[in-house]
Structure formats: C-alpha cells, structure tokens
Amino acid sequence: MQKVFGRPEALADVPTHYCPGCTHGIIHRLIAEVIDELGVRERTVGISPVGCAVLAYDYFNCDFVEASHGRAPAVATGIKRASPNSVVFTYQGDGDLASIGAGEIVHAASRGEKITVIFVNNAIYGMTGGQMAPTTLPGQKTTTSPRGRDPEVAGHPIRVCELLSSLSGAAYIARVSVTSPANVAKARRAVKKAFETQLEGKGFSLVEFLSTCPTNWGMTPVEALKWVDDKMAVYYPLGEYTRVPEVG
Amino acid sequence: MGEKVLMKGNEAVAEAAIMAGCRCFFGYPITPQNEIPEYMSRRMPEVGGVFLQAESEVAGSNMVYGAACAGARVMTTSSSPGISLMQEAISYMAGAELPCVVVNIVRGGPGLGGIQGAQSDYFQATKGGGHGDYHLLVLGPSTVQELVDLTMEAFDLADMYRNPVMILGDAILGQMMEPVEMRKRPPRADLPPKTWATTGAAGRPKNVITSLYLDPAKLEKHNLRLAEKYKRMAAEEVRYATHMTEDADVVLVAYGTTARIARAALDRARERGLRVGLFRPISLWPFPYEALATAAAGAAHVLVVEMSLGQMVEDVRLALGETKPVHFYGRTGGMSPSPREILDDIVKIVERGA
Ligand SMILES: Cc1ncc(C[n+]2csc(CCOP(=O)(O)OP(=O)(O)O)c2C)c(N)n1
Ligand code: SF4
Ligand SMILES: [Mg+2]
C-alpha cells in the first residue's frame, strides 16, 4: 500500500500545545514538508520566537535555537554569516516581528540576509493572552483595546509585506493564508519559493501567513477561518509582493 | 621574546582577537572604541572572517548569540551605553551557555554621560547587568600588553566554560599607545569540542539551544548546574597582582588604568619613606577576596581608588570585613585621580591613623 499522508521527517513525532483550530500547526507542517522536499533537513537551523511558537524547537526535527523576543532575524544573521552553508529560517509572530523586532526585520531584509522568515500574523498577542498587536485591525477588540483599536490613539496596523518589499535586499516576499485547500497549496508553493530563494543565494525571503487565534479572538475555529478571509485578507491582500530589483 | 610593536589599545584588542582565532565580529559605532570595528572591517576579510556593522547593539549582540550557536569564535565590543543595550543578549547567552567575548571600553555615565574613561560599569559587569542568576567572567587589564594577553585568553575561557567573558577596559586604555608583543597563542588543547553547536543535524540527533525552562523544577536544576559552573570558575580563575604589599602599612587597591596611577602614587610615597603597597585585582569576577585578605593582613589601612564613586570598594569591604578601615578615593566621569591626590589621601590616612 502506498502511504499518501504521513509525518514529514522534518517534523518531530510529538503532540503540540496549540489550541484547537489554531493554524500554527498547519504552518509547521508546510515548512517541514518543504524542508523534506528540498532535502535540506540536515543543513537546516530554525529559530523560534517568543510567542505561542516558542516551543517550535520541540516540534521540528532539525537543529533549533530559541531567540529573545523579536531578535530572531539578528540571531539568524549571526548563524548564517558564521555558517553560510546552513539553511536558516526564523518563525515569528506579529508582535515578535512587527513590534519589538521591527528594527531587526527591516535591517535583515535591507541587508539581503540569505535567510527565510516565516511570519505568522494573527493580529494579536496570542501567548500573553490577547493584547493588541501592531497588526490588530482597526476596530478589533483585544484586552488592551477593549473598545476596538482606534487608529487615532493606537496608530494603524502595519502591512509588513508591503513595507519590506520596498527594500532592495528583499528577494522574495509573499502573503498567504491557509483557510482552504487551495490557499494551503498556494502557501506551500510560497514557502518553497522562499527556501529556494535562500538556497540560490538571492537574498532575503519572507512568507507572511494570515493565521488564526480562535482562543483570543473569541471565535470557533470555523468562524476564525472566515474572519481571516473576510476581514484580514481585505486589509492584508494575499499575493507576492517582491518588487523587481532596481537596475544599476 | 617576540618583537614589540607600538599599538593603540583598541587596535591591539582587535588584532589579539584575530590571533586567538576570532572570525566573527558584530558591532555598532560608539566612542571611545570605534577603532575596534574599524580595524575589524579592514582585517576580517583578509583572514576570511566576518565583519558586520549591526543596526544597533541590541541586534549586534544577538548576532553574536547566533554566531556562537554556530560554534564560531565571536566577539563584540562597545562602550557603556551600548553595553547596556547588550544586556538582553548577554543574559540569554549566559542562560544558553554560549561562549563569546564582550569588550567594554568604559566611558562615564550614567545616561549618555561622557566619552572619557571611567570605571563606573563595575557593578553592571560583575553583579549581573542583565536579568537572572548568572555571572560573566570579567577581566580588567591595566596595560595594552595585558589587554592583548587577556583578550586572547578570554576566547579560551569562554570556550572552556561555555560562558560569555567580558574584558572591562576604559577609554584611557583603549586610546593609549604602548609597545606590545603580539604573541600568537593557539587555542588551549583541552577545550571541549562544540558538539552542542547548531550546524545542522547531519548524522546526529538535533541540537537545540535555549534558555527556556517552563517547568520550575527544571529551571531550578538548570540554575543549580550553572551555579556549580560559577563555583568552578571562582575556584580556578582568580587573578591578581601585588606590588610591595609585604611590609605595607597602607595597601592601595585599584584595577585597570587606575592601578597604574595608584602605582605612581605608591612610588612617590615610598620615596618619602611611607610603606605603601598595591593590590591589583585582574579578575573582577571572580574577585580575589582571599588573596586580598592575605595581602592586606599586615596593613593598618586599605585605600581603594577607582574612577567611580565607589563600586569595587564594596567587594574590598566584603573581603576584609571589619578587620581594618577601608578608605575610598574616587573621581568620576572622565576625571581620573592623580598620583598627587592619592598621595595626599595616603598621608592623611597615615597621620590620622598614627
Ligand atoms: C522582552 C520581552 N517582552 C515581552 C515579553 C512577553 N511576551 C511573550 S510572547 C509576547 C507576544 C507574542 O505575540 P506574537 O509575536 O504575536 O506571537 P503569538 O503568540 O501571537 O503567536 C510577549 C509580549 C517577553 N517574553 N519578552
Ligand atoms: S493562543 Fe492563539 S495563537 Fe496561541 S496557540 Fe492558542 S489559538 Fe494559537
Ligand atoms: Mg500574534
């Protein structure tokens, strides 16, 4: 009998701590599948963030480093520069990447670091219990924006792909979601392109996932997927963002 | 004996690191240590190493964390305000047991302070600096030659103990030109192999580097294991120098640049027939408590001199307890104590004590 659905080798055989309906798990699987497909598991070093994915090092079956909050791109830079043959990826939430780590991600992209960033945007601080994130939508209620995010007070949500794609060092930037089998397939292709960009030495690559947090959004898993499609994907359009590099 | 070359402290520290096999440098410009990254930016490409100017000390020190994870010999250098920003990564590296060398060419503080030499980061360097129960090995050189020798040794010590090592210099030492012998020293032969490095899980189980222990019992166990290591460091790595302490009535205690000034005061005091000695801690953590107690056993007075308003003096008091008066003289924020001022203090102490 042919095995059609199994655990990727790059994924460890352990249960995860993610809430029911949280899409962190699917994203892990996609990354692991791509690592397997490219045959780079034994060269890969992952960097986990501070956030719900902090224990990602338990879930992947490759070398892993835990970074401090927001600094994963700097840690990845250190690893990649010291060991250029390694395939280095970071896995970061929106608080981690777009708030406390905004400086590190911009400069890693501008330097064209040959790393791959998996950016999990769930419009909230999941791990600390649902506070406002830099990506929280206008009007969205969180524990620190109880009346809904007011851009007059709390500023506007940051569109990371659009921001980073203005930088010449960014070789591949895409935004995806995993709300349907078709979207999952597209997301998988984007992750593969991002890793290939790194392997070909072209520069910085990032894939932003619009991800769910049913727990802190106060929704069922199905409602959460719908909210991604109806609300998040409107503010954060899916697609590839990489600009054609400037000539000369 | 090798040939001596005239080198500025900051450039000497950079070349010493290269000679010790350091092949990764990350840093951010700050006076008075800019010669170090500038030297590294020229020199690293020549030896096939990595030089990268980071966007901040926060990022630079986390790049150090990454390079250390990859098993590289890695260094960063900065001065006081920049070292404050590195405390996050330093704490994480201590927690994850990563070797690296951090050089602080101290300037006056607090805040933006000034750009002249000072010793006001002693507490930060030796009493924690970042969060958590941890220690750095802290070495305080007082000549450019010692800066070179201790920097080279620092890489071995970092690898030996899997711990960040800090060189605590100051602006005077960094800017000073002195003849130095650049003795190349190969890494110690007894260093443990870096089997823990995250270089890809090829033909072995995966390596994970973290300082996270969510289970309190495991975190305590981790801390107790670290404490065992610090105990070993405290037993093995005490370094100090003494000068004429045997017959001294007054023992001066000073480290780094200040020890040189104290030495000049000592010479003048001896010319006047005053029996003065000098005890110079070289390892600031571990502090040479016992050696100081022994060296000062016969003295009636101890005078601590610092370029701060009194930081190391607390360790001196810990070492000596109530056995004798511990006096203090300090200048701060780039105002270094003069031999004359120290001598005046010695005379006052002797007259009062008589
Ligand atoms: C320096 C620092 N500040 C704050 C925290 C607390 N903290 C832990 S996770 C987190 C937010 C994580 O949110 P996000 O990056 O969006 O990840 P998610 O949990 O949503 O996946 C914060 C603020 C920390 N660990 N370190
Ligand atoms: S809190 Fe939110 S992001 Fe975190 S695991 Fe639960 S659903 Fe996922
Ligand atoms: Mg989040």
Image: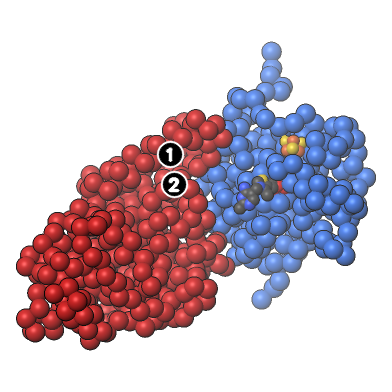
Chain colours: A blue, B red
Dot 1: within a 10 Å radius of its alpha carbon, few (fewer than 14), some, or many (20 or more) residues? some
Label 2, label 1: how far apart the Cα atoms are: 7 Å
* Residue extending furthest toward the right: A230
Residue in view at x 33 percent, y 52 percent = B158
Question: For this view, does B33 lie left or right of residue B147?
Answer: right
Give the chain of mark 2.
B
Q: Secondary structure at mark 2?
A: loop
Q: Residue at (28%, 60%) from the top-left corner?
A: B317
Instruction: Have a look at marks 2 and 1 and say if they share a chain.
Output: yes
Position of A212 relative to A78 (above/below) = above
* Residue A15 x/y as whole percent: 65, 25
The image quadrant that residue B250 belongs to is: bottom left
Q: Earlier in the sequence, mark 2 or mark 1?
A: 2
The vertical placement of A219 against A108, above or below, is: above
Q: Who's the residue at 27% across and 61% down the image?
A: B316
Q: Quadrant of the C terminus of chain B?
A: bottom left
Amino acid type at circle 2 is Asp
Q: Residues within 10 Å of mark 2 (few under 14, many from 20)?
A: some
**Can residue A235 be seen in the rendering of this structure?**
no
Quadrant the N terminus of chain B occupies:
bottom left
Q: Amino acid at mark 1?
A: Asn
The subunit letter for the residue under badge 1 reads B
Asked whether residue B234 appears in the rendered view, the answer is yes
Mark 2 = which residue? B133
- Callout 2–callout 1 Cβ contact below 8 Å: yes
Report which residue position mark 1 lands on.
B223
